[in-house]
Image (cartoon, rainbow, N blue to C red):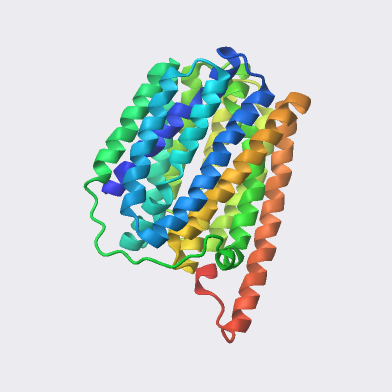
Amino acid sequence: MKAGYIQVLSSAGLSGAALLIPNMLRDELGANTMEIGIITASFNLALFASSYVFGRASDVHGRRLYLQGGLALTCVALFLLVFVNSKESLAVVRILVGLCAGIYPSALLAHVYEMEGRVGRFTAYGSLGFGVGTFVAGFVGIYYQIFLVSTVMLFAAYVISLRITFGTERVHKVPFFPVAIIRHNFPVYLSVMFRHTGANMIWVVYPIFLADLGASALFIGLVYGINAVGQFTFMRFIDRFRTNHLVIAGFIMSVITFPSYTLATRPEEIVPMQVSIAAAWSCLYVGSIKYLMERNDEKGTASGLLQSSLSISAIIGALVGGVTVFALGYHGAMYIATVMALAGLLVFLMGDRYLTRREKMVNGGKGSEGAWT
């Protein structure tokens, strides 16, 4: 349960700090949508590099150091947000937050799976934390106070991490560039990159989209909270389903939900879409994590590569999304995201079928258990 508390608090701190940064950049610091996209992409580039390096390191050296050290450094980085006074200084601190925030998640996730063998309920706590953080941010509504509250949440997570028992940990020899692991899991990595690139074309300016529909800061926090509570609810009950079925369901619901955002003309009309996208991400994320945990001994590396894939998607999506919204408006980004989600579904179906056929040939017709569990 300590790991669950850490997941809730760290997710709440990071999501709360990030929620209104696009609004702060536009309304307080004078940034346009292209600059917002670049700053968001810079954060995700830092998160990508950190997740890749430290996910592998947690397999090579053990989980404790990277879990506790990462939480402590993220706490310090969030506190520095209190002092930003320009879009340039905000960009620098966001990069620092990204570097620190990528250190600990893979170590925490691998520790939970090794101790409990299940990830659905654990990832649900992350969604609960996301909801708590975004709601608190919307309720507080003052930027520097939001950053202080987020810092306190990360500090509490760090304190709890000091009380976790790790026991005897297995370490693995993992090359710096693990080609075999990437090849073994490419259907998930590549397909999620497609879908999440499209999604981030929407999310990079989503708070601004909601504000332009007439939503207040409190309602924006509530909208994000509905999504998070939905994820928390769904993730707690979907561990029982087959891995590939979860992934496919996540893609199909994404294809349905993304274009539905274009129908909204008032803030309250967004609510049903938030429930739908919560179900989509719950299925896709839990399914992807299960796919990796069941197929790999190097669980920190495999999950770190998934986070890196998400970060690459966020980088591309933020850059392309900022330009797309600037040129085509919100709806243009939403339609492109729909096409990207459909492409991700096709990549997963073809890639998983190819790997399953290949593994059956290698294993004398038995296949890979993890691909279909």
Residue depicted at x 41% and y 61%: 59
Between residues 324 and 165, which one lies in front from this camera angle? 165
Visible residue check, residue 278 = yes
Would you place residue 53 above or below residue 79 in this image? below
Q: Residue 189 sits in which quadrant?
A: bottom right
Q: How many labels does the image show?
A: 0
Visible residue check, residue 121 = no
In the displayed structure image, the side of residue 294 where residue 150 appears, left or right: left
Residue depicted at x 51% and y 64%: 175
Q: Position of residue 81 (x, y in %)?
A: 44, 23
Q: Residue 336 sits in which quadrant?
A: top right
Would you place residue 132 above or below residue 164 in this image? above
Q: Position of residue 25 (x, y in %)?
A: 57, 19
Residue depicted at x 44% and y 61%: 299
Q: Where is residue 253 in the image (x, y as percent from the top left)?
A: 61, 47
Residue depicted at x 40% and y 56%: 58
